[in-house]
Amino acid sequence: MRVTFLGHVGMYVETEGGSVLCDPWFNPAYFGSWFPFPRNDTLEVMPFATPDYLYISHLHRDHFDPQWLTANVDKSTTVLLPAFRVDHLERALRELGFTKFVRTDHAEAVRLDGLEVVILSMTAPADGPAGDSALILRDSTATLLNQNDARPRDFDELDAFGPYDAHFTQFSGAIWYPMVYDFPAVEKRAMGVAKRAAQMDRAVHYLTDVGAPHLFPVAGPPCFLDDDLWQFNDFGADPANIFPDQLTFLRELDQRGIPGGRLLVPGSVAVIDHEGVAVEHPPGALHPDAIFADKRVYLEQYHDDWAERLAAEKRSWPRDRYDITAELARWFEPLLDLAPYTRRGINGSVLIHVGEGGTLIDFPAGEVRVWNGEPVMHRIDVDHALVESLIERHVEDWVNELFLSCRFRAHREGPYNEYVYTFFKNLSVERIAFCEGYYATLAEPVDEMFQCGEYLVQKRCPHLRADLERFGTVTDGMLECKVHHWQFDLATGRCLTSDEPEHHLHTEKIEAEAEGEGSGHAGSGVRAPEPGPERPGPQGQERT
């Protein structure tokens, strides 16, 4: 295999069964805060414009660059699609003009004329309902694992497709923790040291378990060219900085006695086979020496080159166009009504603080209102123009815009609560229904039923676990889930949308008692949902 590295985790892989373009990212992301490091804006991209296949791991904007894909990639390219539980990625790519898709199943091999493809799909709310994924490519010459920043949960699934010749993985930070929090300086520094060590430990754990002989640190770090964010860049001497660069991680591998680490920069070409790997770096300004000999000077030039475009980005943000509280109340309150598990999981208020005032999201009450100075569990201080931009574009995943930008300050009472940021990933009926269904599988018995007219019906839709008690409507004996409009015959449970047996609905006719009162079934009433789990994921550290 021949891999041309395009920057961050972008790569163009030439195999015996065709070429695969993976996660090309070239334009600044997250309100102009993240830039690719090393820079790739001078790379000649035309050789990569007509791949046989396109793979986008997930919808985070340092992996999915719609502007670049629109301008540069042939729309007749076939997309390798992860098996996500919702189709947001496919929809986004169709909006750009892509029409050909190979739909994969999680951890199932697909053979494509000399190329074997496996995609591992992660679909828990912590991954975002749109999901995250890792890619395995195999031909007769080599097997490559492109883990990017996914976190596969089943090492047996990885082992099943080994041994691997090369492993590409994230090692650096991709989060806002702990930098944005108003913790005391000593405490924040200790958190940064622990976070930096933990993320490198995790990368090393994956690398050593997979056991590939050739290891490529990718998918980070970004760099920060805005003056307000410049301090987040790592210049090598601060163990509390969560954005260590590639050379730092390669030194970490050396210190741990782990061989095989190799550096890639935009334009590097790695030829990989079962016998070994040969890496050739580009000349001139793209060569590693030009990047790392004096990283500060390199980033200062990068900063100057992008200063006007970054200023234009800031001028584009809307200001004083919207009543933030009124707009968020119209948007969020219907979602809160559909999210009992999320509300109980947060069990407090979140303040969106802009200027002198703010908007309070009262999760226990299910209300959004003007903040009157009352205590809050979580506070987000942010330029109102950024919130107005989110409102104007109706961004359904604020993590993928605001929070990853690091353009805010935060305060929290108590430990990290993953429900908070998971809520902000799920700002649509479809997304929140998926999220609530996931929590329900952790908290409710699988045979949870509710009374629907003359029938007892399973509470969760067989499609994506939406709550049919909340999202179901009945017309002429047909039950329809309003989240994705799947339909079921109420008398038989037969799915009218899919022929797959697992999509049939469990229903039971309620037999009246002899006296003609009540129901003969002990569970005929609507059951209140059990409390959700205290935390849906790891505590103490944010993750995307």
Image (cartoon, rainbow, N blue to C red):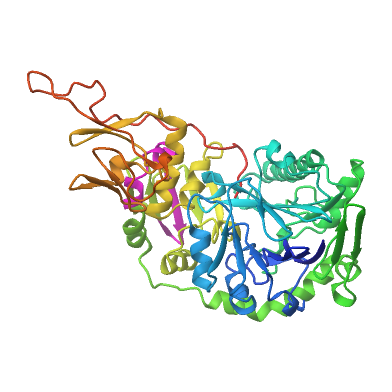
| Image quadrant occupied by the N terminus | bottom right
- Residue 462, x across and y down, in percent: 39, 41
Tell me: 219 left or right of 101. right
Which image quadrant is residue 437 in? top left
Residue 304 or residue 99, whichever sits in front: 99
**Residue 78 in sight in this render:** yes
At 41% from the left edge and 72% from the top edge, which residue is drawn? Answer: 320
Q: Residue furthest top?
A: 514
Figure check: 195 above or below 382:
above
- Residue 16, x across and y down, in percent: 78, 63
- Residue 129, x across and y down, in percent: 50, 50
At 60% from the left edge and 45% from the top edge, which residue is drawn? Answer: 542
Which image quadrant is residue 453 in? top left
Count the marks: 0
Q: Which residues are magenta?
A: 334-358
Tell me: 329 left or right of 250. left
Residue 83 or residue 227, whichever sits in front: 83
Q: Residue furthest front?
A: 113
**Residue 342 in sight in this render:** no
Residue 321: say if magenta. no
